Image: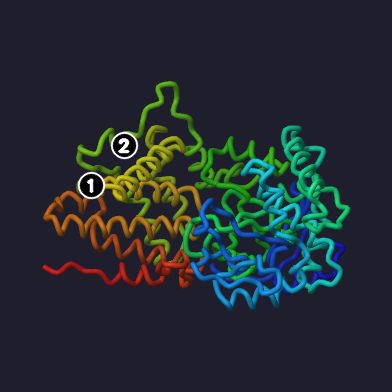
């Protein structure tokens, strides 16, 4: 790369950028990274928290945590809100000192109201990037991000016309409110939208799978290519985008992130990557002959003209719950893998478990049926007094979802860990409810509904989330993952 500052940062983090005949460039490790190691950590060029419809869903401008009822505000602009004095102080010293009073957030809110809700984050990102790029004196990390921004490609000539039409409408609103917002930049808003639209990131809560905000981090976009089975992922913590290793990475290995959900069928992924990011995926999961690639082929199968439902899926919750043996075998493999940390034979073991299953039982369509079953059971549990059968079906469907996750995602991805934790809590609550009502059938042990399973799932969640999330962090009103695991792992029944 032509930038000395970027090259210095890359080398400092044990990385090297190489030319690639297919991808153009790739970033490889020049030192070993252990699972859970931080590969790269940098503040985004621009970021902002996701906005809910209710005031209670407002989030901290620094860490994106949900705001308490009493929340500090910036004493100068009186607009930026925080979850704590610590976040307010850290945000001021890291970036808000050069941003404050440079843009009227209320004017941005007014401009957003002229657009459909789905276009408003794009307007906020465009305005924020244009403003940030216009600052004169900035810290070193922001100079690096701005240099990386200029190296990104707009792909403006490749965007479909309907997307460009949407961008033109957003640009029109921005230009109409330019003086109110406080923009003196002459940047082409459509170019900014084209460049940011295929290089933004969604941030998620470090202690849960809920989306918390939006990031524009050109350096990470520039350095790390996509893989449907990546060896790295990022967590947003305290204003930093932290890229971590999901597995042991050897010298010479390429560092990759997932640009989209790897659970989607292969043809859907390929179409979306081509339409949004303008490349054809050639990762090992899409093009190789590995065990994971073969599992991906199985997941991408159509159900056929008969459209049969999964064999064990309940038509109602009166029938006794049942579970296929492959589900428990896959979960046991995941639990063992996350206990000893070795991956030898794990991928082949997954293929051996699911290789002979028909599409009705193992495919993306089958997964969606079980996910809907899980969500329906959870809704019933939260809204009414339900039978032990419904609770048991909630556990079974959650284990199906976990088994599908184990088959398609890297084992140490946070989504797998959170599903482990939720399944553990479901099983425990079901056991407690059944113990209190004396309705615990002996057959439930065969379904994997046991105290031992509760504890193993909880510890597995802990091991995974220590790699790819922040299990010690607690959201407002919630227990941290570490606290939840400690409670679950210490449970017992008194005879």
Residue 414: horizontal and vertical position, in percent? 49, 59
Residue 59: horizontal and vertical position, in percent? 56, 62
Numbered circle sitting on residue 313:
2
- Counting the numbered discs, the total is 2
Nearer-the-camera pick, 391 or 223: 391
Residue 164: horizontal and vertical position, in percent? 76, 37
Residue at position x 42%, y 67% from top? 477
Q: Quadrant of residue 167?
A: top right
Gap in angstroms between the C-alphas marked 2 and 1: 19 Å
Residue 324: horizontal and vertical position, in percent? 30, 43
Nearest-to-viewer mark from 2 and 1: 1
142 in relation to 228, above or below: below
Residue at position x 40%, y 47% from top? 401
Numbered circle sitting on residue 386:
1
448 sits left or right of 173 in the view: left
- Indicate which disc, 2 or 1, sits on the residue closer to the N terminus: 2
């Amino acid at each position: 790369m032509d930038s000395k500052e970027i090259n210095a940062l890359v080398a400092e983090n044990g990385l090297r950028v190489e030319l690639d005949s297919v991808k153009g460039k790739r970033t490889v490790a020049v030192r070993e990274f252990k699972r859970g190691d931080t590969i790269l950590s940098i503040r985004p060029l621009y970021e902002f928290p996701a906005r809910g419809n209710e005031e209670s869903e407002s989030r901290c401008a620094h860490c994106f945590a949900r705001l308490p009822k009493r929340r500090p505000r910036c004493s100068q602009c009186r607009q930026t809100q925080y979850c704590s004095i610590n976040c307010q102080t850290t945000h001021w010293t890291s970036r808000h000192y050069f941003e404050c009073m440079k843009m009227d957030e209320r004017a941005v809110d007014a401009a957003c109201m002229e657009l459909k809700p789905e276009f408003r984050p794009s307007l906020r990102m465009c305005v924020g990037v244009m403003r940030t790029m216009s600052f004169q004196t900035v810290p070193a990390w922001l100079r690096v991000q701005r240099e990386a921004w200029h190296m990104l490609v707009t792909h403006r000539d490749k965007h479909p016309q309907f997307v460009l039409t949407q961008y033109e409408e957003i640009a029109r609103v921005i230009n109409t409110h330019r003086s109110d917002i406080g923009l003196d930049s002459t940047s082409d808003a459509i170019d900014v939208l084209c460049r940011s639209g295929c290089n933004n990131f969604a941030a998620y809560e470090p202690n849960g799978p809920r989306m918390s905000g939006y990031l524009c981090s050109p350096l990470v976009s520039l350095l790390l290519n996509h893989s449907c089975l990546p060896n790295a992922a990022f967590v947003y913590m305290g204003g930093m985008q932290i890229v971590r290793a999901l597995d042991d990475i050897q010298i010479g290995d390429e560092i990759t992130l997932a640009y989209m959900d790897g659970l989607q069928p292969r043809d859907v992924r390929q179409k979306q990557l081509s339409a949004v990011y303008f490349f054809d995926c050639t990762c090992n999961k899409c093009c190789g002959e590995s065990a994971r690639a073969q599992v991906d082929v199985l997941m991408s199968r159509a159900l056929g003209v008969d459209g049969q439902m999964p064999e064990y899926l309940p038509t109602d919750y009166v029938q006794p719950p049942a579970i296929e043996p492959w589900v428990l075998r896959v979960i046991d493999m995941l639990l063992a893998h996350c206990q000893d940390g070795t991956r030898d034979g794990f991928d082949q073991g997954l293929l051996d478990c699911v290789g002979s299953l028909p599409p009705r039982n193992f495919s993306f369509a089958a997964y969606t049926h079980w996910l809907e079953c899980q969500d329906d059971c959870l809704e019933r549990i939260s809204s009414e007094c339900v039978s032990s059968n419904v609770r048991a079906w909630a556990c079974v469907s959650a284990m199906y979802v976990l088994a599908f996750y184990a088959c398609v995602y890297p084992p140490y991805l946070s989504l797998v860990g959170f599903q482990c934790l939720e399944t553990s809590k479901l099983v425990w609550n079901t056991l407690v409810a059944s113990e209190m009502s004396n309705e615990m059938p002996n057959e439930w042990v065969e379904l994997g509904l046991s105290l031992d399973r509760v504890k193993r799932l909880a510890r597995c969640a802990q091991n995974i989330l220590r790699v790819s999330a922040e299990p010690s962090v607690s959201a407002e009103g919630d227990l941290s993952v570490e606290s939840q695991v400690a409670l679950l792992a210490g449970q017992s029944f008194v005879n």
